[in-house]
Image (cartoon, rainbow, N blue to C red):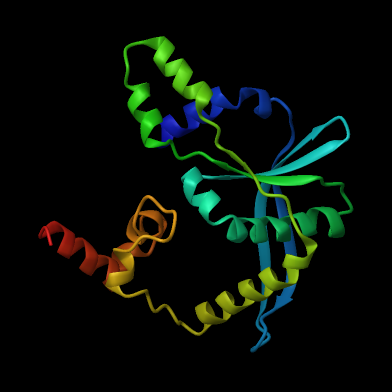
Amino acid sequence: EAFKQILCYFRRNIELIIKITEAEVKLTLPEQKTPNNEIRYTIEGIIDIVREDDFTWMYDIKSHDKQQVENNRDQYRKQLSVYAHIWKSLRGNPLDNTAIIATALPRELKKDLLSDDIEIRNKALNKWDPVVPLGYSEDEVEEMITDFGLVVEKIEGKEFTPPPVERLTTKDEGERNIFAVNICRNCDARFSCESFRTYVRTKDKGK
């Protein structure tokens, strides 16, 4: 599945890929302090930069579903706004826009890629657009850094309370999949999470 995502991403975005002027750029915002306990931490991110003529884009590749990104644009934009702040304000580089490249393959595309007809496969691939432009706002940077800090405080305080099992079976507005599919399947700690384990046991019993 991962290889298929990479292959489709490359084939669909070859024109964008060859325009990348800086790949796997590591951005760092050190010496941050959490809001309450003043714990020191560092924000890091890895992005790609595309410069074309006088226009500069920042891209962040996510193995997420495009619909999930579009349904949570504010969350993704805030993250990229912090990266944009580091790139533009602290490093002194120009920037015009930001975007997420969501590499998860839609269900319809997966189905068409199984076809023996190469025209159907090519048409489906050309129709797929994984890029979600987000823009950025300097006004959101301080808010997002504060949110980062609050998460750090919870981690340092060993506060890892998971959402209730009922939350795992619900869908957010506009989402196609339930919370357990959208969020839990991407969480490395899911198999030690009591809520997720209970959800899996319940699902296996067909309840």
* The image quarter in which residue 41 lies: bottom right
Question: Residue visible at 21% across and 69% down?
Answer: 198
In the picture as drawn, the residue positioned furthest to the front comes out as 173
**Residue 1 vertical placement versus 99 (above, below):** above
Residue 110 visible in the shown view: yes
Q: Quadrant of residue 2?
A: top left
On the image, the x and y values in percent for residue 194 come to: 27, 73
- Can residue 1 be seen here? The reply is no
Say left or right for 171 vs 158: left
Residue sitting nearer the eye, 161 or 44: 161
Quarter of the picture holding the C terminus:
bottom left
Which of these two is toward me, 177 or 79? 177
Residue at the (49%, 32%) spot, across then down: 6
Q: Is residue 169 left or right of residue 140?
A: left
Q: Residue at x 76, y 45 (%)?
A: 97
Quadrant location of the N terminus in the rendered image: top left
- Where is residue 88 shown, x and y percent of the image? 84, 54
| Residue at the limit of the structure toward the bottom, as seen here | 37
| Position of residue 200 in the picture relative to residue 19 (left or right) | left
Point out residue 163 in the picture as x, y percentages from the top left corner: 36, 74
Q: Is residue 4 above or below residue 117?
A: below
Find residue 96 and report its horizontal and vertical position in percent.
81, 45
The residue that appears at 57% across and 81% down in the rendered structure is 153
Quarter holding residue 115: top left
Left/right of residue 12 with respect to residue 143 in the rendered view: left
Total marks drawn?
0
Whether 133 is drawn above or below 120: the answer is: below
Is 96 placed above or below 52 here? below
